[in-house]
Amino acid sequence: MKPFEGKVLQDSEAVHACQLDGKGGIKPISADGMVYSVNPCWLHLDYSLPGSALWLNETPLLPDGIRNLLAGESARPWVTRLGEGTLITLRSINLNADSRPDQLVAVRVFITDTLIISTRRRKIAAINDVLTDLQEGNGPTDSGSWLVSVAEALTDQISEFIDDLLEQKIPARGTLALIRKQLIVLRRYMTPQRDVFSRLSGERLAWMGDDDRRRMQEIAERLGRGLDDLDASVARTTVLADEITSHMTEALNRRTYSMSVLAMIFLPTTFLTGLFGVNLGGIPGGGSSMGFIIFCVMFLVLVGGRCPVVKAQ
């Protein structure tokens, strides 16, 4: 890519705008000077901001075919080469407040040997981690190592989230369905993300060195092991769901049996109370002062006699 004026980047209303210094740190982009291809410039944009959206549509630094892709709707992770650059879409665990981790956020990156443009709509913790390393002088030195650092930060957060899910021995009541949903969402998006990392490790990109490709392959393998854990967790939640259903069915059967026992005990007494409760003449004991007491004694004898029979059954 040819040199360009720094003010071309300053008009982007970027969340972060800096140039890698090649030593693990960053330096500001001068609006008055020219930017040469010694070290790449990094622009991190929030495409929901009007200034950034306008810059993406009008900047001459981007090919026409990717303008809308950098600010489009969320998509599954994928990678494609466009001329000198590569367009990459990745997914990250959502660590924003008032959001669930499985509501994944997307980061899109157009990257060359001299320019890195990343876009997002919601904050991405992995990007902030890479920026912090750069500010401390321990960050990437070029485009290839920058991409590896981002991929590693994303995978670290995903691995921590998977570990947290696995540590829940017995999920709290009502959370099993949410856990299964989170596992399924992760499985859906992390599988193509692992494929993206594997493809990047095998592509002969001019801005990625052999060490960067090796590290990217290690990240892909680590994410693959996390996916294996996800599969095991999905199977575990299925077993837990079956066990919960079994316990609920057993408890329902016990309650049904108890109701049946009570019905067997009180059915004859219900018949007698209904029979003697009719308001007709000729009822035995109707004219005796001891009739009610005799009926109650018979009632108790009948109930007491039914209980041993029911227990024996």
Image (tube, rainbow, N blue to C red):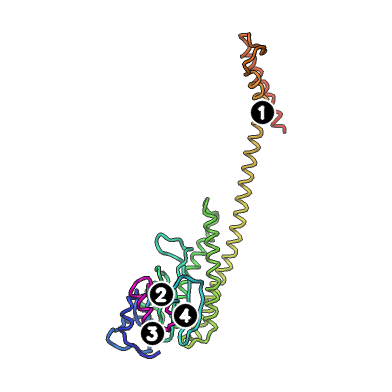
Q: CA distance from mark 2 to mark 4?
A: 11 Å
The residue at which mark 1 appears reads as 265
The residue at which mark 3 appears reads as 61
- In this view, the residue in front, 195 or 59, is 59
For badge 1, the amino acid type reads: Ile
The residue at which mark 4 appears reads as 87
Label 4 close to label 1 by CB (< 8 Å): no
Q: Dot 3 surroundings within 10 Å: few (below 14), some, or many (20 or more)?
A: some
Relative vertical location of residue 45 with respect to residue 208 in this rendering, above or below: above
Q: Dot 1 surroundings within 10 Å: few (below 14), some, or many (20 or more)?
A: many
Numbered mark located on residue 119 in the image: 2
User: Farthest residue in the bottom direction?
Assistant: 2
Residue 112 location, x and y as percent?
A: 43, 85
Residue found at x 62% / y 14%: 293
Q: CA distance from mark 3 to mark 2?
A: 15 Å
For badge 3, the amino acid type reads: Leu
Q: CA distance from mark 3 to mark 1?
A: 87 Å
